[in-house]
Amino acid sequence: MEGPGFWAAAVLASVLVGLSKGGLPVVGMLGVPVLALTISPVAAAGLLLPVFVLSDAFGLYAYRHAFDRRVLAILIPAATLGVGLGWATASVTPERLVTALVGAIGAVFALSMLLRRGAEPPARPARVGAGTFWGAVAGFTSFVSHAGAPPYQVYVLPLRLEKTVFAGTTTILFAYVNAIKLIPYWALGQLSVANLKTAAILVIPAVLAVFAGVRLVKVLPQALFFRLVVWALLAVSLKLLWDAAAG
């Protein structure tokens, strides 16, 4: 893991991770595909997990007063279940199939929102049943391929949270998910001393990007913010479908 090509991809990936922790969801999912241009996807996922976790600390501080308690109370236990399921089935789950399913879910949902005509529907309540299902799916796909955002957003976007509450809820949930992924990732051999040393360097651009993301969330109009989120979701979902087809 050395050379200008690797470091260019690694810094860009860490910036994308930092922006996502600053409140710009979905873009963090591009980190692994970008880094996978120079190393294997499995190695990229293992290398970026410490960057996710350390960046989370700054995102948690930035959004410590902006989050939805009910949504987190529903999603955290469900995501824990999903991570556990991912760990238990890690040796038999085809990553290509998971990638395709996540891409299909995100693409269909994003297109349905972009093609919707007429008045915006009213905000949905945070229901336990739907949250348990989508939270578990988000935990599972996050464990397998750091791709928990599409199923998470299928549940949360229709709730129509205020933009900073949406950003904070997203940051807190995935900070928790990334933290509990450390033990199984270590047990599966995807973390190493060499990875941790490289991650320590990549945290620097990631942290700077966290604060840039927080600033962007504050200045973007709410309607534009969510429009960008949906377009980003569509772009990432199509990229996942492409990866699954090419793999």
Image (cartoon, helix red, strand yellow):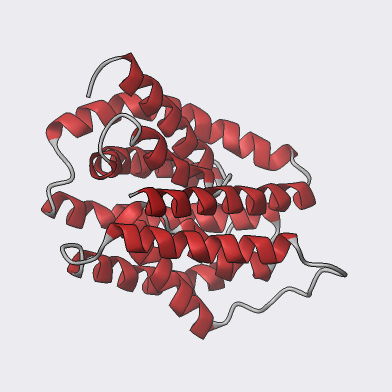
Q: Residue furthest top?
A: 4
Q: Residue at x 58, y 53 (%)?
A: 233
- 41 w.r.t. 153: above or below: above
Residue 48, quarter of the rendered image: top left
Residue that lies at the very extreme toward the front in this rendered image? 246
Q: Residue at x 87, y 69 (%)?
A: 118
Q: Measuring 26% from the left and 33% from the top, which residue is drawn there?
A: 39
- Look at the image and tell me whether residue 92 can be seen: yes
Q: Position of residue 100 (x, y in %)?
A: 41, 60
* Residue 29, percent from left and from top: 45, 46
Q: Is residue 80 above or below residue 66?
A: below
* Residue furthest out toward the bottom: 129
Look at the picture and state if 196 lies above or below 175. above
Q: Residue 75 location, x and y as percent?
A: 46, 71
Front in this rendered view, residue 78 or 12: 12
- Tell me the residue at 54%/61% (across/down): 106
Quarter in which the N terminus is drawn: top left
Where residue 12 appears, as percent x and y from the top left, is: 45, 28
Q: Is residue 125 shown left or right of residue 127?
A: right
